[in-house]
Amino acid sequence: MLRAQRTTLAAIAAAALVSATAGTAFAAAGGGHSALSGSVPSWATGTHKVSASSGAATVDFRVYLDWRGGDAAANLAQSVSRKGSGFLTAQQFRSQFSPSQTSVNAVSSWLKGQGFALGHVPDNRKYVEASGTVSQAAAAFGTTFSQYSVDGTVLRSNDTALTVPSSLGGVEAVLGLDESAALVHRDAAPPAAFVNARPCSAYWAEKTVTNAATPDSTVLPTTPNLPFAPCGYAGAQLQGAYGVTEALNSGNDGSGITVGVVDAYASPTIVADVEAYSAKHALPPIKGHFSQIVAPGTFNRPANKRQDPAGWSGEETLDIEAVHTMAPGADIVYAGSANNFQDMDAALNHLVDTHRADIITNSYGFGGEALPKGYIKPQNDIFIQAAATGISMFFSSGDSGDQTGGVAGAAPTPDWPASSPWVTAVGGTSMGIAQDNSRLFELGWETGKSPLAAGAWASPFYTSGSGGGTSRLFAQPSYQARVVPTSISRTYGGAAMRTVPDVSALGDPNTGFLVGQTQRFPDGHDAYSEYRIGGTSVSSPLYAGMFALAQQKAGHPYGLANPALYTTRAASTDITKADLLANPGVARTDFANSVDATDGYLYSERLLDFDEGLTIHVLYGYDDVTGNGSPNGQTWLDALAAYTG
C-alpha cells in the first residue's frame, strides 16, 4: 500500500493552492524576461529554509511546452471520450497539438547558450531535457536556490519564481530544478522479506479467535467473535468475487488489450516471479504477454537507496500480478524509469505518445495537491493526450484517507495525480470472500487498529484507508455533475469541485491481495514467497485488469473512462455500511520481526470502515471513499459494452 502520508503537506495544500487548469501565466520580470507563475513550491517558505544550495550540485531538468491551440486538445479529448469514438492516432495528435519545432529549437538554443548540456526531446516535442549545475540554473532562470526542510527531508528549491526570456513562446513549466519529485510515494511492498504469521484464513472467517489457537497460546478477546484476517486473496477467489469467472472462461479475458504499468526501477526477477505465481494460482503463463521498456532520455543516475529501489521492485510485481489475475489474456507492458527523482513523467509520456498501451495503471502519487504548477500542468497535458488518443488512465487514490489521520482541525486533501479530472481515481475496499469464491460483502477501506493490551483490545486509532476528498485545484468535471452530492463537491463553499475517487476495488491490506515475489531473508538468502498486501496500489491494477475485459467486450477504446463509468454506475456494486455490523473487523497475527517467531508475535484487532475523525465517509450512492463502487461482474461488463455516449 502507499506509504502513510504526512499531514504537513496537506496543511500547506489547504492554504497555498491556486488553479492549475488554465494556460501558463506569466508576469513581467524585467530585462525581457517573464516569470513562470506557480514555479515556487508551496513548501519552500522562509520558516523551512535550512541553508543555501551548493552551486556545484548537478541539476537535471525539463523545460515543458504548452500544447498548441490553448484548450483545443482538452476540448477534443472531452468530446471523443464522451462519445467513445473519434480518437486520434499519436501522429494526428502531434500534428494538431504538439509544440512546434520552431519553439523547441528556440528553447534548445537558449539553454545551450546558458551553458547547459542538451538531452532528449520526445516525439511529441512536449519538453526539452537539459543538465548543468545549480549555479548555471540560478543565473539562467534569475533566481537563487536553497535547501528546505520538508517533513524531515531536506530538499532543494528555487527561492523565487523562475524566469525565462519573453521571446520563448509556449513555455509552461520547468520540472526538476526543485526536488518536489522526492515527495512521491508508492506502494510499500517490503524491500526485505515479509511473511504472514499464522493463523490466517484461507477464506473469510475460516478461522476465528474461538476456533483457532494462537501459536504462542495467547488468549484473544472472544467478543466479538472475530475472524482471523485472510492470508491473502488470489486467482479464482478474486475472479469469482467480482463475478468475471464465466466471462474469463468464455474467452473474455482481456485478449487483444494491452495494459501499461508505470513505476520506478525494475525487478530483476519479475518474469520468474509472475510465472511461479501464475502456476500456483491457476493463471496462464505470462510468457509472450509481457515486456519491459525504458523511456528514452531518462536521467540514468545510479540507484538511490533513499528512493528504495528494492521496494519499487515489489510494486512492479504487485501491479503486474494484479492485472494478470483479472485479465489473464491481456498483454502487459512495464515502463520503468531509471530513478524516482523525476523520471516517471518521462516514462508515462513515452507510454502515451507511442501508444504502447490501451489502458495504463499507476500506483504512485503525492500526499496531497501541494505541488508547483510545473508538476501539475505538464502531467495533466499527458493525461489529455492519453484521453484524446483513446488511452484509459487509472491512478490509485492514495492510502491515507483524507490526509488528516483523523486529527480534528487538520486540512483534508485528495492526492495528486488522482485528483486530475483526466484520470480515473480508484479507491479501496475491504472484502469478505466465501469458500465458494463469492463476494460476501464489500465495505469502504478505512482501518482502525486496536493492539492487544493486558488481555483486551486497546482503544482504536486510525492507520490508513482509501484516499478521497474534494480537490482544491479542479472544478467539477461534467461527468460528476448531478452525481456527486453537493455536500461533497461544495465542501469548501463556492463552486462545485472535482471529487475523488471515481470507482473502487479491493485495497484493505487486512483483507488483501496475495502477492508472490523473490525476497531477501535475514540470513541473506533469496527465495520466492507469498504474502498479503493491500493499498489502493492493489485497487488500481485490479480495476484496470477488469476494465481490459470491458474494452475487449466492447471492441473499442474508451479514452477517459469516467464518462462511461459514471453513466453506467448503476451496474456497479454500491459500497455502503450495510454489512459493517456483521463484519466489524478481523484479528491479526504478525511476527514481531516480520519473518519468523524468533522475536515473538504481535496481535491486534483491525476495525473495518473506521472513519472516526475523517471528513470522508461511505454513503449510499456516490461517496468520497469508494466513488461509484466496484465492478459487478457480467452486469458491469454488459453495461460498459452497451455504452454509446
Image (cartoon, grey):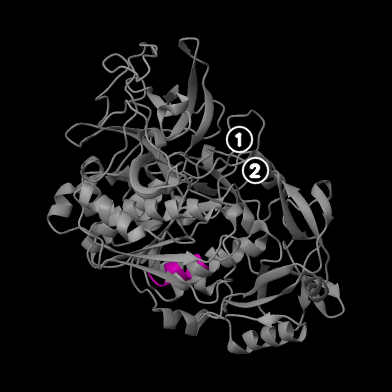
Q: Tell me if 46 is positioned left or right of 493 in this view.
A: right
Count of marks overlaid on the render? 2
Precedes in sequence: disc 2 or disc 1: 2
Could you tell me which residue is drawn at 39 percent across and 14 percent down? 218
Could you tell me which residue is drawn at 31 percent across and 17 percent down? 213
**Is residue 21 visible in this depiction of the protein?**
no
Residue range corresponding to the magenta coloring:
382-390
The extreme left residue here reads 250
> Label 1 near label 2: C-beta < 8 Å?
yes
Can you give x and y, in whole percent of width and height, for residue 318 in the image? 38, 50
Can you give x and y, in whole percent of width and height, for residue 640 in the image? 27, 56
Numbered label attached to residue 216: none
Nearer to the camera, 177 or 608: 177
Instruction: Establish if 397 lies above or below 274.
Output: above
Under circle 1, the secondary element is loop
Can you give x and y, in whole percent of width and height, for residue 83 in the image? 35, 66
**Amino acid type, mark 1:** Thr
Nearer to the camera, 145 or 635: 145
Task: Characterize the local packing of mark 1: few (<14), some (14-19) or many (20 or more) Cα atoms within 10 angstroms.
Answer: many
Q: Which residue is mark 1?
A: 404
Q: Which residue is mark 2?
A: 10
Task: Characterize the local packing of mark 2: few (<14), some (14-19) or many (20 or more) Cα atoms within 10 angstroms.
Answer: many
Nearer to the camera, 528 or 181: 528
